[in-house]
Amino acid sequence: MAKLALAIAAALPGTGQAEAGDAALARRAMHLLRDHCVRCHNAKKTKGDLNLTERALALKGGGEGPALLPGQAAESHMFQFLHPDSDPHMPPKKQLSDEQIAALGQWIDAGAEWLPAELVIEAKLLDPAALGQLPSDYRPVFALALSPDDRQLAAGHGSLVTVHNLAEKDKPALAKLTGHRDAIQSIAWSADGK
């Protein structure tokens, strides 16, 4: 009896391989939708009143009616509009290859399994900048302020404020104000010039 069960199981088509193939096809379809469709058909930007971020919304469709008819690629607007001679034509600027169109057709004919996690557009994370002290020789001027009597100029050089005497020809520094931990970006004099 055990040998008979084994023989029957061996004669049946492998469902494990079919499931793996369906999952790979669904992943491929989701990646095609993510890369070529979802940027214009999402919750914030619904061109043609179509949102492709959820299966239920794709089934509901947009201004042209249901976008997706699982098991019926030829009748699905999503599939029809991919062909170069269709009007409207999607995507409008960059045509999908014949292989990509065929993959989406196979996916729809296979039931259009939806894998929401595969639709997520991952934000590119930037590496945080390593911040530290400004180099001692780096002194760009980010801020300037002229005193109310027009005789002194305060200049923010990096993390240092230098007050210059404008009344003298060589404009000597009258004072250097240190102790700031960051670049000086704004300077203001009080109304009395102090």
Image (cartoon, helix red, strand yellow):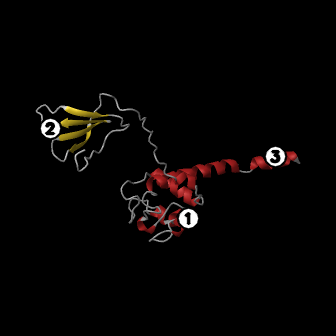
Specify the quadrant of the image occupied by residue 113: bottom right
Q: Amino acid at mark 2?
A: Leu
Nearest to the observer: residue 4 or residue 41? 41
Element type at mark 2: loop
Q: Which residue lies under the disc numbered 3?
A: 6
Dot 2: within a 10 Å radius of its alpha carbon, few (fewer than 14), some, or many (20 or more) residues? Answer: some
Q: CA distance from mark 3 to mark 1?
A: 36 Å
Dot placed on the residue nearer the N-terminal end, 2 or 3: 3
Does the CB distance between marks 1 and 2 fall below 8 Å?
A: no
Does the CB distance between marks 2 and 3 fall below 8 Å?
A: no
Does the CB distance between marks 3 and 1 fall below 8 Å?
A: no
Q: Amino acid at mark 3?
A: Leu
Left or right placement of residue 66 versus residue 179 in this view = right
Q: Is residue 154 above or below residue 72?
A: above
Q: Which residue lies under the disc numbered 1?
A: 72
Dot placed on the residue nearer the N-terminal end, 3 or 1: 3
Give the residue at x 15% y 41%: 151
